[in-house]
Image: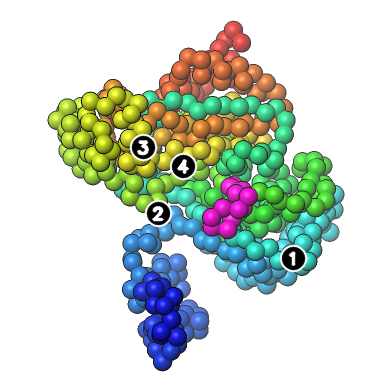
Amino acid sequence: MENREDLKSILPYLPLKLESSHLVWPNPVIEALKSLSKGPSHSQVDSGEVLFLAISDLRNSLSLSPHILASSAADGYALFFDEELIAALLSCSFFCLFPSANRGANHLPVINFDRLFAILYEKYSKSQEHKIKCIVHYFERIHSCIPTGFVSFERKVLPLEHNLPLVSYPTADFWANSVVPLCLFEIFPSGLIEDQSRGALEVDFANKKLGGGALSKGCVQEEIRFMINPELIAGILFLPSMSDNEAIEIVGAERFSNYSGYASTFRYAGNHVDLREVDSLGRRTTKIVAIDALSRPGLRQYRANCLLREVNKAFCGFLDQPKDQEYQTLLQYYDSCEAHPANDFMDANMSKIQATLIEGCGTSVDTDEAEATQCMDSKLQVHHSDVGIATGNWGCGAFGGDPEVKTVIQWLAASQVTLLSSTVNFSFSRLLEVGYFWRKALRPFILYYTFELEALQNVDQVCNWILSHNWTVGDLWNMLADYASKRAKGETKLGFFSWLLPSM
């Protein structure tokens, strides 16, 4: 074996050693794995934090880079499962094999299926029966043919404090001062989010505990999605309830069932063949993000802190945090920015920033704006996602949110570019003057499904009016904040759209 050229070429990249013509794990790794296999009473690995340290030690023993892992779960994390493993996990849930003690104390939802079945007998309903039919159909499908793809579960976090290069939790001033343009807004009075064919990120109107009532008696948007895409249920096993600065993104979950109706009229409607393409990681290109809105907020939803909470929650879900160092070219100036007033710093350092940004692009400082912007996009690999958002009346049904306000909040969140603005105290206007900020929204479009909600019958007119006046994110946020303040004080009872455009 040691003479094989193909092995020699890859051995330096493997966490293995070649001994007596065999590939083996290093002894420290073998001993650590044996200890872990005997359980927490033996290994003393009894928490997520200790497990992280144990995994880090294993990686060090294998000479793997420590920088690949986040230093803390507070920065978010992603886990990949193959569909066969998910099928095994869901089989355990079906037969109620998972320990249930202390799940609530650890902010974890119920994972076993006992309540799903018990409710059918306690208070029979057709919708509950048809939820179970979706689950049974899933097992029929995987019994005949085990799927071979992968599904990823990512906990997305906006750090509450600056933590470069991550985007931190935005303040109200951040939104008020944004000069980012609003993205396109497309209205669909009918149709379903999961049927969109534009490759958009699909919003799960989530409970703070992932899945909501999927494994009990719930049967609205989130629960239905978990029934027709049962692989989503696997996330319930290990993903605790979301904090205000967190969201959960799941990529690759296959759809197995068709359905009709909603809530009490929900019905399983036969097999679904999922024809979504597969990405380079073996996942179907179905991207679902779970974001939880405030529950039954009443007039509280118009308070400044609640408005900020909702826009940041949506923003967290819609954002792609930088996965590498592509923004470090500009972020290296961060400390200097904090130490100097923004405009003074820009005046003193603009030439240096300009030279840094166009270095290696084959252009000069006299390059016109279009060419300079194109150059910087290439140089910094700036992330302008071509993935839009497919959403609807998030937090407006059982949660009781204001549909007009929630619509605007999601539009703001989808549009906002933040990778520079939340971490660097530059003056946006100055950056725009010299053409060094990217005039694109983070998400290029929103596909908004109103489900024929009467309160949103004029949303297309309002959005078209706003876009025709070239409003920025800051313009719309400030108008929304002004309205919300008046609504919270009882100075108006009008909806936001009528307040904004009285003649509509």
Q: Which percent across, then down, holds residue 93?
A: 68, 66
Magenta span contains residue 133: no
Disc 3 target residue: 377
Q: Secondary structure at mark 3?
A: helix
- Rounded to the nearest angstrom, the CA distance separating label 3 from label 4 is 18 Å
Question: Which quadrant does the N terminus fall into?
Answer: bottom left
Label 2 belongs to which residue?
75
Residue placed farthest to the bottom in the image? 20
| Drawn side of residue 431 relative to residue 272, left or right | left
Dot 3: within a 10 Å radius of its alpha carbon, few (fewer than 14), some, or many (20 or more) residues?
some
Lower position in the chain sequence, tag 1 or tag 3 = 1
Q: CA distance from mark 3 to mark 2?
A: 26 Å
The picture places residue 476, in percent across and down from the top left corner, at 46, 22
**Disc number placed over residue 319 in the picture, else none:** 4
Horizontal and vertical percent position of residue 144: 78, 66
> Which of pointers 3 and 2 lies earlier in the amino acid sequence?
2
Predominant SS along the magenta part:
loop
User: Magenta stretch?
Assistant: 277-288
